[in-house]
Amino acid sequence: MRFFIAALFSLIAFAAFANEEDHGHDDHAGEAHADSEHKATLGNVTLLHAWAAETEGSEVFVYVEIDNEGDAPITLLGAEADIAGAVELVGFQSKDGVASYAPLPMLPIAAGAEMVLAPNAVAFRMTDVTTHLHEGDDFEIHVVFDAGEVAMMAQVEPEGATQHSHAGHNH
Amino acid sequence: MFETVWYALPVLVQDMLVFLGLLVPLAVTGGICLYGYRVWPLIRGLLRKHTAISATFVLLIAAAVGISVGLIAQERGLREGTARAADKFDLIIAAPGSEITAMLAAVYLQPTALPLIDGATYAKIESHELVDLAAPLAFGDSWEGVPVVGTTPPFVDHLSEGLRAGRVFETMEEAVAGANTPLQVGDVVEPVHGDGSDDFSEHGHAYTIVGKMNRTGSPWDNAILVAVESVWEIHAMPTGHGPDWDGTLGGPFDPSQFAGTPAVLVRAEELWANYSLQSEFNTSQTMAFFPGNVLAQLHALMGDIRQVMSVLAVATQVLVAVAVLAGLSMLSRILARRMALLRALGAPRRFVFAVTWTFATVLICLGAALGIVFGVIATAVLSMVITALTDILVQARLAWPEMHLVAGFVSAVAVLSLYPAYLASRRSLLDDLRS
């Protein structure tokens, strides 16, 4: 019995092995960058690598890495974007084997913690997007916290991308 | 405009429209071929006359369709089954390492050596204001191949949502059995160290089964749950409580007496709180992850495998379709004399064309319909086998994607059948009458 479970997961685990990142706070341990066009700050909060995948649809998910380097918690409330009719903060969930995204009213980020908005996790869901996003495009997004709002540029990555093309780089 | 209207439609309506859309080529081709003719009496006669060969074609098509739709449905069922098995595991916190390894151990009970979380870290998790349930897990023992897992009473309630029989363990000598174990309330088990397959050692500690869980559809159905304190104690470790402990099982634990745990199940009532906790406990001392998210990433990576399976399924159907068309070309020779007689009686070439095309399409439609039945049976049997082998409840069912595949197949082959029908209508009348 266990052999079959092990065989099943070894297949998918093997496929995932190359992509899986071991945990720890070494996400930015790679090559350093001098540019700061993918970075925004609000007090002690740093936002890095906002991105979305290319799509022809009117629903677009936007992801970003948020690092709360301060000594007080902050709360992420949502985002706004001119190219979308509405933007909401959503979280991935799996119920009865079926995956979906549910709206999140807020998202507290503890002092010193990093919140990574990513596919199959937390995201900003833009709906009624009027512009078709193509790889290489960028668009402005305003990320809203309880402590204020910060604007930054989000980059459009290829269709089906799972991370920003600069993910793992220092800025 | 079209996109807006389309996405505003209910999913069921979208699926039905796609299904009907895929059948449009069949309807249009049929409408053009059969316009002005009544071919059904002749088709029924041909089917009666050539029952054996018709049945062979139908079974061949049915087998191809059945295997294809069964495979695709099974893949989806397996994906949903593995995700459903992880439903109860909202957030797992473990020592830094591989999420997949920790998930295999905590959710699917695969024996794995994991680093341990210490008492201070566990206390921080347990006492966090957003945490509604924190349960340490302790693995390593088994009874006759059935894993014995140490945890807390609230975790049993969370996992089973009430018990099928009996009650949750209240002492270190009591246990709760998973739904698929052969154990009943009142049975006594004596676990051994490891999986019991080799080099095992008796602990000399017996548990009395006092409750049996409801079915969860996960490998936990084939496990025995005991107090985590008892697992620590029989391994000569502190029980997690100080000298003035009153014997009440579960938290809060004394950090200085905490033996360590490879994984902690954490649950917060609200989804946002779970994500907030995940962010907070992704540190250099701990990693926090949602098994559902890890599975979704794995399933996304498996997308390529799924595409290969779909291509193989379509390739199988195309190969069978080609074989069927080749067979129909031969069949048109068998029917040649009858068709020649029809033409000699005054039937136009288009009538012969219509009869041959309809005959082929009827075989294809019957084969596809029977193939769906085969697919349902194959899916049910495969699901039972996989569930029995893995303890992961797989409930694969045919759904709209399979129906779309079948509709596309029927339409494509119906259009391709125009060629043998054309060949049949172009045969030499005199040669066929003489043959």
Image: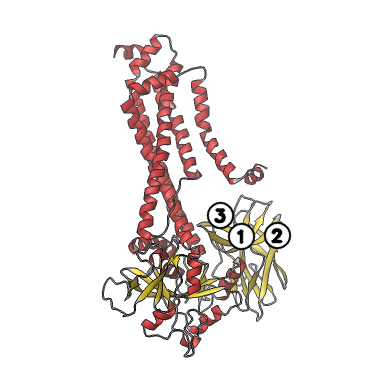
Residue that sits furthest to the bottom in the current view:
B243
Co-location on one chain, circles 1 and 3: yes
Say whether marks 1 and 2 touch (CB < 8 Å).
no
Which residue is depicted at the point 45% across and 78% down? B261
| Amino acid tagged 3 | Glu
Task: Please give the label number shown on residue A102.
Answer: 1
Which residue is depicted at the point 34% across and 24% down? B331
Measure how far apart labels 3 and 2 are at the Cα level. 20 Å
Q: Residue B322, image x and y in percent?
A: 37, 34
Q: Residue B232, image x and y in percent?
A: 40, 81
Residue B112 visible in the snapshot: no
Co-location on one chain, circles 3 and 2: yes
Residue where numbered disc 2 is placed: A81
Give whichever of B249, B304 is nearer the camera. Answer: B249
- Judge whether A124 appears above or below B206 on screen: above
Q: Residue B50, image x and y in percent?
A: 33, 23
Residue that sits furthest to the top in the current view:
B345
Which residue is depicted at the point 37% across and 23% down? B47
Kind of element beneath mark 1: strand
Measure how far apart labels 1 and 3 are at the Cα level. 23 Å
Quadrant where the C terminus of chain B lies? top left
Task: Please give the label number shown on residue A159.
Answer: 3
Give whichever of A108, B86 is nearer the camera. Answer: B86
Q: Could you tell whether B70 is left or right of B53 in the image? A: right
Q: Chain of mark 3?
A: A
**In terms of sequence position, does the residue under pointer 1 or pointer 2 come before the other?**
2
For label 2, the crowd category at 10 Å Cα-Cα, with few meaning under 14, some 14 to 19 and many 20 or more, is some
Residue A61 visible in the snapshot: yes
For label 1, the crowd category at 10 Å Cα-Cα, with few meaning under 14, some 14 to 19 and many 20 or more, is some
- Judge whether B136 appears above or below B395 on screen: below
- Judge whether B195 appears above or below B404 on screen: below
